[in-house]
């Protein structure tokens, strides 16, 4: 223990300038988090500029500086090579490693933990009930920040070498991501069996812990790199060989149209008279977005249907080269909706080859149906209010179309409906109020993360709630704008608020005959 404290005090004396800078950045981070609604009128002009512009960069700057500090502290006794001065000292490797861990906890985790306690108390969130999650957040930081940086610092000789390694990893990652996008199979939503997934996570994070320990114990960079490469290879091998437990086809059960949670059909698509691209996009853009207009009906009351994924194919395999399989969509369908437009990304080169050829298109949709639970009416007060589901909220003083809310750790899940016929807000078109028939909705699924991805830098999250107006066929006929029309909120507005419960996941198939891809590049509704 004496040796651990000796090394710790030596590092504190040597790196005091970096420690001071770290505390200064943490103070700026705290000031930023004290103003979650950064563009509010109650903030002064100088603070407004600072918080709204520079505030977005405070957290990344703080995390990057922490990473720099960890690298500097670990590399003060470099583990690469065997001719460093410290190897002549009577240092035990585990004491040296624990001294670095102690430095991380004392100068990074402990100050941040007190900032977390201060923020919870400042916004009147209960500290005691959130204490276990705060401690879990600190532990997750050890895995996602210290261990990741420790691997880099222990395998490189100095900071320049570490920086070069990061640059190589970033370039290689960007290249692999680009190759993945070019050869994307489109099978979104695949997952390994649970036991394999847990084993892969254990192997991954275990290697991040084992490699620094091995490097401290043996100071053999190539052996440590070999262990890390072996763990990565085993992970890749398992991903390639073990069949997926869930695919889109297995997770979403195929049903006939009458059993679907919503009745969907294609709307008539106008011909573009042979024009190249109706949207006028540049030929240099590598991808084209097809817009498929559909009519919506039959969504049951008190439910919402989410279009999660979309896949387009054709009758002819030769003409399906432009298809990229399943693509994420996330389009909300509410009981009052009458029209929607689904988008699908295709490769421009393949699109150009077949854009004027009439073909039969098959559209496959993966749908999730959510049911309201614990529904109640929330009346928006004039001042800040506390809600058991939403957290601490208020009407935005800057934009009357938003509710600004605070919650702990994650954004809560909710379904909200606003009936403008009962709205006490004045009907003023200049202020953006909508027509009386346009029921509006807001939705958010529970946003949560598993350990150790639970790591965060603030226990208080801010989010906004805004209401999307219903898509009506009458608006299309009147050529009314479907975007940019806001729903004004005011004190006394009643909102039907509930929690979403996933009811079922299904797939349906739709056919669109004798259509050209070129005709699907125009704007159709939303």
Image (cartoon, rainbow, N blue to C red):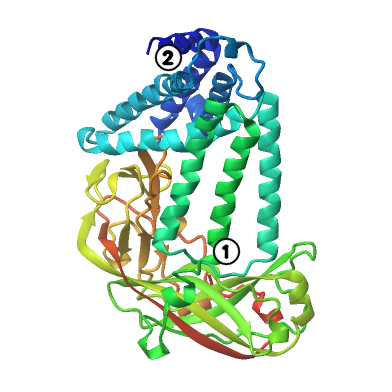
Q: Residue at x 66, y 23 (%)?
A: 81
Q: Relative to the observer, which residue lies in front, 424 or 331?
A: 331
Q: Residue at x 52, y 68 (%)?
A: 329
Q: Residue at x 54, y 30 (%)?
A: 150
Q: Which residue is the site of mark 2?
A: 4
Query: Within the image, what quadrant is residue 503 found in?
Result: bottom left
Per the model, the C-alpha gap separating discs 1 and 2 is: 44 Å
Query: Within the image, what quadrant is residue 350 found in?
Result: bottom right
Q: Relative to the observer, which residue lies in front, 221 or 337?
A: 221
Along the polypeptide, which appears first: circle 1 or circle 2?
2
Q: Is residue 197 above or below residue 227?
A: below
- Furthest toward the bottom, the residue is 514
- Circle 2 SS class: helix
Whether residue 400 is visible to the viewer of this picture, yes or no, is: no
Q: Tag 2: Cα neighbours inside 10 Å, few (<14), some, or many (≥20)?
A: many
Q: Which residue is the site of mark 1?
A: 240
Q: Is residue 461 above or below residue 96?
A: below
User: x%, y% of residue 21?
Assistant: 53, 17
Q: Is residue 195 above or below residue 265?
A: above
Does residue 209 appear to the left or right of 262 in the view shown? right
User: x%, y% of residue 254?
Assistant: 43, 83
State the quadrant of the N terminus: top left
Whether residue 429 is visible to the viewer of this picture, yes or no, is: yes
- Circle 1 SS class: helix
Does residue 246 appear to the left or right of 187 in the view shown? left
């Amino acid at each position: 223990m004496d040796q651990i404290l000796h090394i710790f005090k030596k590092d504190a004396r040597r790196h005091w300038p970096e420690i001071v800078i770290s505390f200064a950045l943490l103070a700026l981070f705290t000031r930023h988090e004290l103003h979650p609604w950064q563009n509010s009128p109650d903030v002064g002009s100088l603070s407004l500029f600072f918080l709204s512009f520079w505030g977005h960069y405070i957290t990344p700057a703080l995390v990057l500086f922490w990473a720099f500090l960890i690298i500097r502290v670990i590399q003060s006794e470099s583990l690469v090579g065997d001719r460093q001065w410290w190897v002549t000292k009577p240092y035990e490797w585990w004491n040296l490693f624990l001294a670095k861990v102690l430095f991380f906890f004392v100068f990074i985790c402990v100050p941040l933990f007190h900032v977390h306690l201060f923020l919870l108390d400042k916004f009147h969130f209960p500290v005691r009930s959130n204490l276990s999650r705060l401690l879990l957040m600190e532990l997750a930081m050890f895995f996602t920040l210290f261990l990741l940086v420790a691997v880099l610092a222990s395998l490189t000789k100095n900071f320049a070498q570490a920086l070069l390694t990061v640059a190589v990893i970033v370039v290689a990652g960007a290249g692999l991501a680009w190759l993945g996008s070019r050869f994307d199979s489109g099978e979104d939503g695949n997952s390994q069996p649970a036991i394999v997934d847990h084993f892969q996570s254990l192997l991954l994070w275990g290697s991040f812990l084992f490699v620094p320990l091995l490097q401290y114990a043996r100071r053999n960079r190539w052996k440590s790199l070999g262990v890390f490469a072996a763990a990565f290879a085993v992970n890749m091998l398992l991903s390639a060989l073990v069949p997926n437990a869930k695919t889109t086809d297995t997770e979403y059960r195929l049903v006939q149209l009458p059993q679907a949670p919503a009745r969907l059909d294609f709307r008539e698509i106008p011909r573009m008279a042979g024009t190249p691209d109706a949207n006028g996009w540049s030929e240099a853009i590598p991808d084209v977005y097809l817009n498929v207009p559909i009519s919506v009906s039959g969504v049951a009351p008190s439910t919402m249907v989410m279009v999660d994924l979309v896949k387009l194919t054709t009758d002819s395999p030769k003409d399906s080269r432009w298809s990229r399989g399943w693509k994420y969509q996330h389009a909300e369908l509410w009981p009052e909706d009458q029209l929607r437009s689904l988008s699908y990304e295709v490769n421009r080169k393949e699109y150009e080859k077949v854009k004027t050829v009439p073909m039969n298109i098959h559209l496959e949709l993966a749908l999730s149906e959510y049911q309201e639970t614990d529904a109640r009416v929330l009346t928006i007060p004039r001042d800040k209010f506390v809600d058991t589901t939403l957290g601490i909220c208020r009407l935005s003083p800057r934009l009357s179309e938003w509710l600004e809310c605070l919650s702990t750790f994650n954004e809560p899940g909710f379904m909200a409906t606003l009936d403008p016929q009962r709205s006490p807000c004045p009907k003023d078109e200049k202020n953006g109020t909508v027509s009386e028939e346009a029921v509006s909705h807001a939705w958010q699924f529970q946003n949560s993360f598993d350990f150790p991805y639970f790591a965060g830098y603030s226990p208080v999250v801010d989010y906004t709630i805004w209401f999307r107006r219903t898509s009506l066929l009458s608006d299309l006929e009147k050529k009314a704008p479907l975007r940019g029309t806001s729903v004004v909120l005011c004190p006394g507005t009643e909102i039907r608020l509930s929690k979403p419960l996933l009811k079922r996941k299904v797939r349906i198939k739709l056919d669109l005959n004798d259509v050209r891809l070129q005709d699907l590049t125009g704007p159709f509704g939303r």
